Every structure is written in structure tokens, then in C-alpha cells.
Image (cartoon, rainbow, N blue to C red):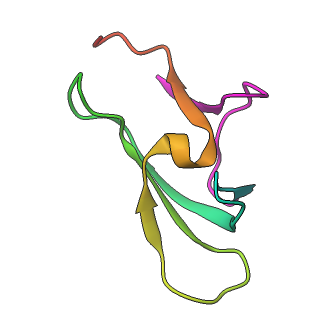
Amino acid sequence: MQLVYEVSNQPVKIGDVVKTFRGDSVVVMGIVTPHKPSSTGRVYVIPHDGSGCGQEFFPSVINAVWTGRTDQ
């Protein structure tokens, strides 16, 4: 199972700078895989400009999806 960006199908990596669906620029700091079939997992991000604190999002917020899931 791998988290990839929906548009490019490229893997999401720690340190990637991406835009959220709201247009905010963030840095990917962590990825948590889904723990059960109904889970989407999470991505942990911090603001790219260094202001504010880290946040936890659903992968769809950064336009990412899981590929190769066998639990659904």
C-alpha cells in the first residue's frame, strides 16, 4: 500500500511541499497508514512558511489517495 498524489500518481514523501485544497502551502512531516478498512489514514503537515503548528489531515486534503489497498 502506498500513498500517491491523485493527479501525478507520484508517491507522497516526507518533506514534500504541497498545497491543500484551500491553497495553503504545507510540508508533509508524517504519514499514517489506514488501520482498518473504513480508515483513510492521516498525513501530518506543518505550514511551509514556518508559522503556526502542525496539523493532521485526511490524505484527500493534499489530493492524495492510497494505492494497492487489499483490505477493502
Residue placed most toward the observer, 68 or 24: 24
Look at the picture and state if 18 lies above or below 9: below
Answer with the quarter of the image where residue 39 lies: top left
Query: Residue at left 64%, top 51%?
Result: 21
Q: What secondary structure do most residues of the magenta stretch adopt?
A: loop
Q: Is residue 1 left or right of residue 28?
A: left
Look at the picture and state if 60 lies above or below 61: above
Q: Measured from the top left, where is residue 56 in percent x and y?
A: 41, 62
Furthest-front residue in this view = 22
Furthest-right residue in this view = 8
Residue numbers of the magenta segment: 1-17
Query: Residue at left 66%, top 66%?
Result: 26
In the rendered image, residue 12 lying in the magenta stretch gets the answer yes
Query: Residue at left 62%, top 39%?
Result: 63
Q: Measured from the top left, where is residue 31 in percent x and y?
A: 46, 49
Look at the picture and state if 42 lies above or below 37: below
Q: Is residue 32 left or right of residue 65?
A: left
Q: Measured from the top left, where is residue 1 in percent x and y?
A: 46, 22
In the rendered image, residue 11 lying in the magenta stretch gets the answer yes
Quarter of the image with the C terminus in it: top left
